[in-house]
Structures are given as structure tokens and as C-alpha cells.
Image (tube, coloured by chain):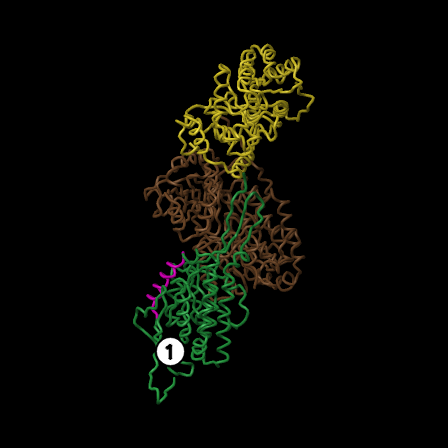
Amino acid sequence: MTAANVEIDGAVRDATSLRAFLHGLPGVDEVGANARAAGLATRSIKKASKVWALETAIGMVDLTTLEGADTAGKIRGLCAKARRPEPSDPTCPPVAAVCIYPDLVAAAREHLAGSGVAVASVATAFPSGRASLSTKLADVRDAVAAGADEIDMVIDRGAFLSGHYQRVYDEIAAVRERCDPARLKVILETGELCTLDNVRRASWLALLAGGDFVKTSTGKVSPAATPPVALVMLQAVRDFAAATGDRRGVKLAGGIRSAKEAVRYLVMVKEVAGDAWLDPALFRFGASSLLNDLLMQRSKEATGVYSGADYVSID
Amino acid sequence: MRTDRRAERVDVRKTYKLYVGGAFPRSESGRSYPISTPRGRFLANAARGSRKDARDAVVAARKALAGWSGATAYNRGQVLYRVAEMLEGRRDQFVAEVVDSEGTTARRAESTVDAAIDRWVWYAGWTDKIAQVAGGTNPVAGPYFDFSIPEPTGVVAILAPQESSLLGLVSVVAPVIAGGNTSVVVASEDRPLPAISLAEVLATSDLPGGVVNLLTGATAEIAPWLASHMDIGGIDLCGASAGQRVELERLAAGTVKRVARAPESTPDWSADPGTGRLRRFLETKTVWHPIGI
Amino acid sequence: MSWEYAPAPESRETARLKSSYQMFVDGEFVDGNGGAFKSVNPATEEVLAEVAGADATDVDRAVCAARRAYERVWGPMPGRERAKYVFRIARLIQERARELAVLESLDNGKPIKESRDVDIPLAAAHFFYYAGWADKLEHAGFGSNPRPLGVAGQVIPWNFPLMMAAWKLAPALAAGNTCVLKPAETTPLTALVLAEICQQAGLPPGVVNVLPGGGDTGEAVVAHVDVDKVAFTGSTEVGKAIARQVAGTRKRLTLELGGKAANIVFDDAPIDQAVEGIVNGIYFNQGHVCCAGSRLLVQESIAGDVLSALKDRLQTLRLGDPLDKNTDVGAINSAEQLARIQELTAAGDAEGATRWSPSCQLPDRGYWFPPTLFTGVTQAHRIAREEIFGPVLSVLTFRTPDEAVAKANNTPYGLSAGVWTEKGSRILHVAQRLRAGVVWANTFNRFDPASPFGGYKESGFGREGGRHGLEAYLAH
């Protein structure tokens, strides 16, 4: 595996071993990582392979609204779109999940009943994460109690950046325990971590602490998901699987708006992590406007003519 | 040579030997050859270096290379300046030897020796400047820090000019070692005595043994062994005979040696030397590194 | 779940391939006296075009034309005017980039993504860079009165046909020389389109002449008495022969020859990027790269991890149709080169090294060799000493930095080297000790017109690129 000469066993024994483990991970050369990501972006995906990619990407979308102005009505629209992204075309797959604030989980649960679309809820004092652990856990408990299938938590970036890895680990582990049976996505907020070395360490930290997914961003901080960040996170889950046999997922969120970008990310998923990750169970896009572009491109592939914004629904 | 009837002292003559690895051995061949003034007066017997002496000299030069090329440029400059100092102190001796060797007037010999001393000073000053002049950073179109620096070629063979026994010699040897190379020098065949005396200066000038190795003897006999030697990186054909230059250059091609061809006519060694000879046996190394966080 | 990429071929029509190509002498396309030869698509063995071959009389005509142009037009022309012609060439290459890229991939067998993203843009950039030097030569550090040499005879290889032409022509023209260029026998086409571009640029007749042909033609160019400067890129063997040939003449010579570069990976390297660098180092352009990182020196303590990551990565390489935009590894340039690779890899087997290649289907027709690595290689093996010039990596290990440097330098070559470590002082320490003209630290196979490139030892002498690249074309 690529995370060379790192022993996972014992990594989480105590704060010292955790720190040693994370700092023992191979460094990431930013220029090289950027070049690799850019190289993958030159793949030319045409015809059947493009159709497959567009449909697969639709099925990987966590259709998201995380606004202070969200209402039950907004959630109803979102859920309808999630179930049937292309109302006139029953062959169009539903999205993977909707992603919303905890207080709206119950409403979404109702609208999505029987659809197979999961309800994901952000929690843990999203997006800043600046609250006491007990508050964060209460937030998680509320969301799970309301029927959330997935919890998107944020890590304490302040603790991470000040080197208190054990505190971050403990918090993730506590949320992991509290959110059962929901799956846990751990938002690293990579835009605040700044370096790819930090992205790699934070990814491993989240995986070691039991996160089912590592997720780039809240969507509230820029930059959010970028190709090099995605590359490093995909390497982390690949290496984690090689070391433990346990496949974990990656969710890219924030800033991905075009189908072209989404297809490029799928190329990255395939060529960096492997075909096994081309599955909504292991890879997601957190997005809102992306979905419509995927639908428009899908329509173009089916009809041969370019689609227009008025031919896809707004949420 | 004075023969004073009252003081019947017989002067002590010098034995001229080779200079290899900081020592002054005789030729392993045991051969010597007589050196005379241009008018035919016997001066001394010089060692007639053989191919095996050349071989030993290359070994000594190779051994000295890491230390000399790895020394700081400042240190090399100090050593070269020290050579000038030592030469200045023995100015009269060199004037006499140049007069004897070249058959020139004392006045002309004085200006030749002065120029030779000044040449050491010139190159002493270049050791820690050439990298800035010949190297630099390269503005590549990408996130890379990219710089080029000159480095010595390695072991350089030098066939010293046949005419100019001291100034010519210094003019070809000093730039080679100023750049960090080590050298195997074949002195002027008929006028080797100033070269051997220069070797004595070098030996007492903080110049590490093996940086300059000096052979006397028949240039045409030794040169092919140097031109073809696989552990030599470059060769200066300055003192090669017109008839042998093509052969030597072809031999040098066998290991892609850097060749400084012989000048078409006898150079004016007193002219401003520029940096041409300094650059001749320098390689440009370019190093790339990404710039990222 | 498996997702296969659909074929995404570039249209070969873009190449505007002609059935026959003439040589370019004195501003005109003319038939040669050397007999026509065929240029073949190495990916299919299909004949692409008939090409006029030049013989010694053609060489003489071209050199005379170049001499005339040098004396009457190009030499006396003010640098600022020369500059504008060279800038024009740069622009025309950019304008015809796609055509040139497709033609290059057809003729050479290299993947379109490389001709499109590397060869052609770098060729244009090289002309653009040197154009700007034409009226600034007295600032280049080669004296206050730098003068051109005269007529340059330039012989280039088949691995980067257009880019090598640019590396030769651009500095020569900027410095005020005129040129007789001999492209490689197996890849003459883009150089002839470049000749057409010289016409389109209005370059005065005779300033650039392009003479296709084989070894004899190249020899005639080198041997011509009125050539003032010989520049050669190719094998060390031929380079030595050229050096012998010009011995005793006044011709100035620069040589860019072979290599057997070490790519050194320390245990604290950024492993994922190092793996990319290893792949880029030896599988880029099918390993037909003189500065290829053909010897991997990996620290013993991480050798297993690096190898398994490397093998995983090699499994994702896509070998096939060079015109497919998703192809990573194209065809071997010629049957002859394929035979050499096969011979040397067979020697690797025979000497006890262990061969490994990713599972990949080789096309039925054309010249193909899979990406290959050998483990258990020592410095005594032929595959660690001889330049294979193919997609074949020899993997060796080391224990200490001194051992790494000693092994890296243990070769008559000295063109390039790589070093991978996150420790800055170690990079500088190792870079200083490597006897190579280009050291890539935490990267590999980067090229730029502003960056001097060239070898130590038997990898040649003279530099191409940057201010240093002018020296080869200036009397000073």
C-alpha cells in the first residue's frame, strides 16, 4: 500500500501514537498532486461511457439544501426532485440522498418514504463545529431520532490545526457511537486545512475514528472540493482499504456544478481508488445545481441536441 | 654560471622531476632527456614521463577531485591567490628560467613572469564569481524553482603550449583548476623547466596534492594515452603538434571528451584572457524542484 | 462494476496527410536524388507517405543555399527583424498545433495526448523563447560582439521529431545562423510541415533547409566542408562517430546523446508523487527519451511498498491506438527499435532479473511493447548499464544516500537524474553529487525552453535551452 511503512495497529493507542502515525504518513507534493489531477482531467469520455457516467453520477448525488431560509415547502420540492430528477423519464435514476439540516429530517423522511433515497443530515453545529461536544452529540441524536440515514458531521478544524488530533479523534468516535445505525460522513472542511498534507492526515484521522465517508467541505468555505483534494482523499480510502480490507467512501461537496467536472471526478475515482468505488455506497457528490447539468447532458446524449435550463426543473 | 678563481664553490644544481599527487617522483621509466636553451646550452636533464606516469597522474588527479571540487569557491580562490603570492616571492628565479628556456631578454621575461603572476590573481578572483556569471535561475513556465550552476568537468588533461613555457602554461592550467577540475599537465616538451619550478610553487601553496599533476617528456608520446584515457573528462590540445591533433581529437571522441582545440596560430598570451578558458571545462547542471505548500 | 472508456480517437484527417513529401531546399519543395523512402505508421505498419530522400548532391545544394542565405540575407539582417520571423514561426506552430499533433502521432506512434500537450506546445514555446533573444545577443553573456557561426548542420532523432527540430532551429536562427536540418528517417513528416511553416512565415529562402534521409544523409551533412557547426541529438555511438568525423576541422560541435538515468526514491519521499514520477520517467513517450529515468533506485526499506504501488498504477495505463485521446502508451517507433528492446529485455531475463508487465492486450499489427519492469536488477546487469530506449524500468535498491549516489553515478552516461525526498537539505546534497546535466527533484521529465538541458560525460556536451543554448551557435 502507498501509505508506506506505517503500522495501523497501535496508531490510535494514545495521543502520542496517533500523532506519530499521522505525521508518519508520506508527504504530498502539491505540484505533483496537481499535475496528476490535471492529467486525469484530460481523459476524454464519449458516447456510451459518457451516458454511463452521467447516470452513475446522478445516482451519487446528495441533493443538498443548507440554507437558513429552508422550509418544509422547500424540502418537499427537493424530495420530489430527488425521487424523480427527470419527471418525464422514469428511466432516470433517483439521487442517492437529500442532505439537509436536522430539524427538517422528519419532513424529508415523510416525502421520501419508499423511494430508496436516503436522508442525510448535517449535524455537530454545522458548519463551524464551534459548540460543546454535548451540544454536538445532541444535534446528532436529534437527527438520527428524526430518521436520518446518514450524518454529515464537521470536524473541529481548530483542534486539528493546533495539533490536538486526539481531541478530533475522540469527537468523531463519539459521534460515530451516537449516530448508529446511521452512516457517518466526516466533513474535513479542506478549504480551512489549506495543505494537502493536512488533507491526508485529516482523512486518515477520520477513517481511523470510524467515519464511513470522508467529505471535503461544508459548502460554506471556499475553496471546497478541488481535484487535488479529491485525489488525496481517494488515495486515503484506497490505502486504508489496502491496509485494513475495509472500503470507506469519499464525498465531494461544494463547488461542483458541471457534469463535465463530475465525469472527471468519476475518472479519478476509477483510476485512483478503483472501479469498486464507482458506487453510491462509496462515492457521493454533495451538490444542488450539479444535478440539473447532469440531467441536461443526459438529455443531450439521448436526443443529440443541447438542452436548456427551462427543460429541467428547479427544486 | 660563475667561475670565480678565489671562491672555488661548485653550485648545487637542481634535479627536475615530475610532479604527481603532490610528490616529485622520477619517471617510473627511469628515462630523462637533456634540456637546453634555444641556443643549445645544456640546462638540465628532465624526467621523460611515460604512459605509466600519465596513468599514475590520472589516478592522482581523480583522487584529488572530490576534495578540490568540493572545496568552497572561496577556499579555491584563496589557494590560487596563494600561488600568486609564492610566485611573486620567487619572481627572480622564474625570470631567469624563462630567459633560459625561451631565449628571451630579461626585460621581456620579467613582463612575462609578471603577467603569469597576475593571471593567477585573475583566476583566483573568478573562483567564487563564475557560478553567478555562468549560472542563474531559469524562469520556466510552471510552478518550479529551476536553476543552473556550472560544475567542473572532472579530470582534465592539458597539453601545455610549447612556446610560452610559463605564461602560456599558467594561462591554460589556472582556469581549469579555478573551476574545480583537477589536471594532468604535459609541460612544454623543450622548455619544461619553468613548469617544474611552478610545480614547486604549487606544492608549497596550499594546493592539495593531485590537483595539478605535471609531466615532462615527449608530448607526442604521452598525449595519446591521455586523449584515450577513459577516466579523463576533457582535454586541452593547445600544445599538440599540428600533425597529431586530428588523431588526439579522434581518440578523445571515444569517451565523448570535451576538447579544447589547439589555437590556429600562436596566441598572444599577454592578452586579456576573458572567461573562455574558464568556461571550457565547466558543465552546466540544471536542477528543478516544485514550488508548493 | 466496470466502466470502460469508449474509443475517443482524434480524426486523422486533421493531419492533412499527403501521399508524398518533398525535401525543402532554398525555399522550395523539390525532389531529392537520394531515392524516395516510405514513412510508416508504427502503430499499424501502414505506409503513410513517400518521402524524398536526400543524397550528397542534395546536401551540397542545401548547404550552398544556406551559405548564400547566411551571407546575403540572414547574417546581415538586424536581430530585431530576425526575431519577428522566429516569432512568426512560433505562432504558426500554435495555429497548426492540432494538425501537427495528429501528424506526429501518426508518424511516430506516440499518444496524441503527449504530442498535443507536450511536443507541439514545447516546440512553439521554444521558437517563442529564442525569438526574443535575436536582438539581445550582446546581453547573453558571451561577449559584447557575439557573432553567428554560419551554416549549421543539424541531425535529429525520431523520439520528439518536431520538438527536436525546434530545439535545433530556434537558437540557431535567433543567433543568425542558417540551417540544414536532417530529420530522422522514420519520422520526417512534421519537420517537412515545419518547412512549410517557414514558407508561410516568409522566411527568406535558404535560411532553413530540411533534408529527409537516413544515416548516409546525416553523414553527408556532418561531412560537408562548408558546414560551420554540427549539432546532433541521438545515440552515443553515432555521437562518437560524429565527433571523430569533425576532428581536425574547424566545425563547432554539440552533442546530446544517450542516458541511463537513475531515479532515486528515499524512504521519506512523497510516495504517490514519486510513483507518478517513476511512471512519467520511464513510460512517457514509450521510454523513447534520452533522459528517461530507466533505473529506479529505491531505498530498501520502502521498496516493497513502492513496487506494489507502482504495479497498481501501471495497471491503469492504457496502451493502444496513439490517436485515442485516452491512450497513455503508444507504439514503439520502429521494428528495429522493437528488436533492440526485445534483445535487451531477453538479456534481463537471461541474467536472472524478474520481469513484470501489467496485463494488457497488444494490438495485432504494428510495433508494440508493454510497459515492463525488472526487479532484482544489479548494477552488473546489461539492463542497468545499456540504454534500452523503451518502456523498460530496471529496479535496484540502496540502503544509504552514499550508496544511492554511487550507484546513480556508476555509468558512463550523465544526462539526467531524479531524487525524491521531502527533506530539503538532502535534495541539495544529492543533487550536488549527481553527475548529470539535469536533476529533477520531486519531479521528472520536465522541459522548458528557458531551462538548459544537456549531458555530462558520454551523454554529450553543449546545452539546449535558456541563455546557455545560444552558446552553441555563437562565435565568441
Main secondary structure of the magenta stretch: helix
Above or below for A199 versus B218 = above
- Chain B drawn in what color? green
- C80 relative to C123, above or below: below
Colour of chain A, in one word, is yellow
Nearer the observer, B47 or C437: B47
Residue plotted at (61% across, 44% down)? C97
Tell me where residue C214 appears, x and y as whole percent: 49, 54
The residue that label 1 is drawn on is B35
Image quadrant in which you'd find residue C315: top left
* Residue C449: x %, y % from top left: 57, 50
Q: Note whether residue A88 is visible.
A: no
- Letter of the chain that mark 1 sits on in the rendering: B
What is chain C's hue in the picture? brown
Per the rendered image, the range of residues in magenta is B49-66
Residue C118, placed above or below residue B213: above
Task: State the quadrant of the C terminus of chain B.
Answer: top right
Taking the spot 64% from the left edge, 48% from the top edge, the residue there is: C92
Q: Is residue C312 left or right of residue A153?
A: left
* Amino acid type at mark 1: Ile
